[in-house]
């Protein structure tokens, strides 16, 4: 039939194809081996790359551990965020954060109770004498059931004023590590009394509807300082003094900004603070 391939022609074609296949087999083998070696090298390089990455990560982790170990052994406690707070440490870059952890952040009553227990345990470890002094109020938001009062060694006036434990902790650090050193530096005297004009006050912030931190006894207003040499430094009268009294008060405000987690406000902030330093542990960390 026309168009149908003859048997002899088909045989010749198949024979020619077989001859070509046989002749090119060595070349195809070489190509196959070359491709296999290339893929093997690529795979080895990929695996080696991963091993190199993990080696670099491990080297970095070891270096970091060495740095942390050296810092832990050699750096001052105040420069290390993981070192626990003590009342003997000077104020440092992490003092506010450490005090905030000791005092606890505002939260649910259960969280607050836990924070209060932690704070009182801290004071007990530091040898501080205090008395549980719950504050009752007709307004539930102004009741402070876990308030405490410090003993006379705190040099506060009025003495034994009830306050939040976190505020007491911050005050003790400030009084010991800021106020006392400044009194010795500027007056060669010690502090006899830190005179406050308000701690717990169930009231809003001036000209607002928002409750003051005083409502939860998380703030204190300090009006003056009585020294053992007979002098009294008064915020209202001495803030603008260019001499030792003014410098003393400014140093105390600056130190409070590094101590009280809620901030420290002075006459420089606004007219409402013309006669006192407002120190708190429950606000927004504003200083001025």
Image (cartoon, rainbow, N blue to C red):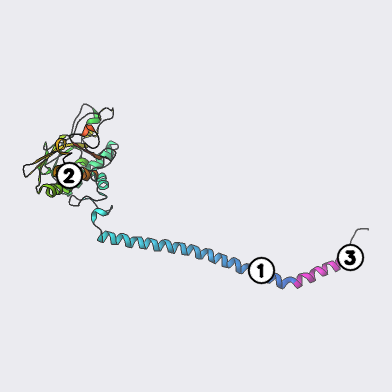
Relative to 69, say whether 225 is above or below.
Answer: above
Find residue 133 and report its horizontal and vertical position in percent: 15, 36
Which tag is nearer the camera, tag 3 or tag 2? 2
Whole-percent x, y for residue 287 in the image: 26, 40
Our reading of the magenta stretch's main secondary structure is helix
Can residue 141 be seen here? The reply is yes
For label 3, the crowd category at 10 Å Cα-Cα, with few meaning under 14, some 14 to 19 and many 20 or more, is few
Find residue 23 and name its label. none
Nearer-N-terminus badge (1/2) = 1
Q: Please report whichever mark, 3 or 2, sits nearer to the chain's N-terminal start.
A: 3
The residue depicted at 27 percent of the width and 59 percent of the height is: 72
* Of marks 1 and 2, the one in the foreground: 2
Does 273 appear in magenta?
no
Q: Nearer the viewer, mark 3 or mark 1?
A: 1
In 3D space, how far apart are the residues under numbered discs 3 and 2 (Cα atoms)? 117 Å
Q: Residue furthest right?
A: 1
What span is colored magenta in the figure?
1-23
**Element under disc 2:** helix
Q: Is residue 182 above or below residue 71?
A: above
Q: CA distance from mark 1 to mark 2?
A: 86 Å
User: Which quarter of the picture shows residue 80?
Assistant: bottom left
Residue 246 screen position, x and y as percent: 16, 42
Helix, strand or loop for disc 3:
helix
Residue 176 lies, in percent from the top left, at 15, 47
Q: Which residue is mark 3?
A: 7
Q: Residue at x 60, y 67 (%)?
A: 38
Q: Which residue is mark 2?
A: 247
């Amino acid at each position: 039939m026309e168009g149908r391939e003859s048997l002899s022609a088909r045989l010749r074609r198949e024979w020619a194809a077989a001859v070509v296949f046989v002749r090119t087999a060595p070349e195809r083998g070489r190509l196959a081996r070359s491709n296999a070696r290339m893929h093997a090298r690529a795979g080895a390089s990929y695996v080696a790359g991963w091993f190199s990455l993990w080696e670099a990560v491990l080297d970095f982790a070891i270096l970091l551990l060495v740095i942390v170990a050296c810092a832990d052994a050699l750096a001052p406690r105040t420069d290390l965020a993981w070192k626990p707070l003590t009342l003997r440490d000077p104020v440092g870059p992490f003092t506010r954060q450490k005090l905030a952890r000791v005092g606890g952040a505002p939260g649910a009553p259960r969280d607050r109770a836990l924070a209060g227990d932690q704070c009182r345990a801290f004071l007990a470890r530091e040898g501080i004498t205090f008395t549980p002094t719950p504050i009752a109020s007709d307004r539930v938001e102004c009741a402070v059931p876990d308030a405490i009062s410090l003993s006379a060694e705190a040099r506060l006036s009025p003495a034994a004023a009830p306050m939040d434990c976190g505020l007491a902790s911050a005050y003790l650090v400030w009084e010991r590590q800021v106020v006392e050193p400044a009194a010795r530096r500027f007056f060669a005297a010690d502090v006899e009394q830190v005179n406050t004009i308000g701690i717990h006050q169930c009231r809003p912030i001036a000209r607002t509807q928002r409750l003051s931190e005083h409502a939860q006894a998380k703030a204190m207003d300090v009006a003056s300082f009585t020294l053992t040499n007979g002098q009294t430094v008064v915020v209202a009268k001495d803030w603008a003094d260019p001499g030792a009294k003014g410098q003393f008060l400014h140093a105390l405000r600056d130190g409070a900004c590094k101590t009280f987690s809620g901030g420290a406000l002075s006459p420089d902030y606004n007219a409402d603070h013309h006669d006192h330093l407002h120190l708190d542990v429950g606000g927004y960390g504003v200083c001025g």
